[in-house]
Amino acid sequence: MQSARTRKSIANPAAWSDIPRGDNYRVALEGELQPWLSKLYGFHLLKIGHLSAQIATDACPISHQVNVALEGENLQVLGNPENLPFEHKSIDACLLCHTLAYARDPHRILREVDRVLIDDGWLILSGFNPMSLLGFGRLVPFVRKRSPYNSRMFTQTRLLDWLGLLNYEVMYKSRFQVLPWCLHGGKLLNAHLPALGCMTVIIARKRTLPLTPSAKKVSARRQTIAQPVGASKSYRQEHDE
């Protein structure tokens, strides 16, 4: 498997409009997140990256929402996603909309997010699906150098593996927007062929206890008190006499 870290510099779009059909992706993503935003709670929501900052999160009850990126407009904090300027366990929820798709070291960003998230904090990830019409466009020589084909596309399975190593519990996962040139991505295809969706989203929560008990702990719980050898036999002999 190819390493997640790369030395290649990828132009990070400053807005969804910088991506061809980017507004379609944004609208589709907002519709996918809408049912879950109302379930987030806490004091601080961190929106990392320019694309995350432009996602409408008015339905989220978290009032203090902070946009973070290296540079740009409509930001409250100028900071590097690989080295977030926040205290340990100080953020209740993090939104990373296609942030990993334009990152040199996505592992480091996830570790930083894990550092600043509180226990049971929420993490929302989105990205492009390589096993889709959008992903197949990367095979065309004259197309793969354009946006969004030049972005990094990680499979949903790979993202789930990264979250599993960090001990996150996945609450929801989905693929959608099968037809990227359509506003709603093709409703019929989205319903019957979601695996071919051009976009993927994962909603997970940070857990502190192991999600699966270890074999040693399971065997310890199943231990029973051993009965003394021959105790019942001696008891019957004494009473028979």
Image (cartoon, rainbow, N blue to C red):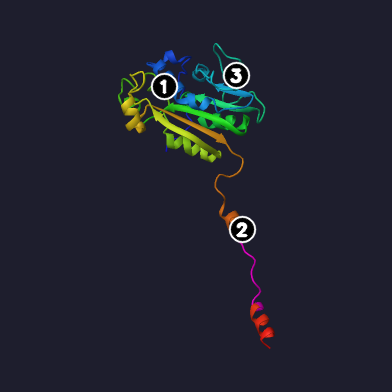
Residue position for label 3: 66
Crowding around mark 2 (Cα neighbors within 10 Å: few <14, some 14 to 19, many 20+) is few
User: What residue span does the magenta drawing correspond to?
Assistant: 221-231
Numbered badge on residue 28:
1
Task: For residue 169, say whether it is visible.
Answer: yes
Tag 3 near tag 1, CB within 8 Å = no
Q: Any magenta on residue 224?
A: yes
User: What secondary structure is the magenta-colored segment mainly?
Assistant: loop
Q: Tell me which residue sits at (44%, 16%) in the image.
A: 16
Q: CA distance from mark 3 to mark 1?
A: 22 Å
Quarter location, residue 110: top right
Q: Any magenta on residue 129?
A: no
**Image location of residue 85, percent across then percent down:** 64, 23
- Between disc 3 and disc 2, whose residue precedes? 3
Secondary structure found at label 2:
helix
| 58 left or right, relative to 185 | right
Q: Quadrant of the C terminus?
A: bottom right
Residue position for label 2: 220
Closer to viewer: mark 3 or mark 1:
1
Quarter location, residue 196: top left
The type of residue carrying mark 2 is Ala
The type of residue carrying mark 3 is Val
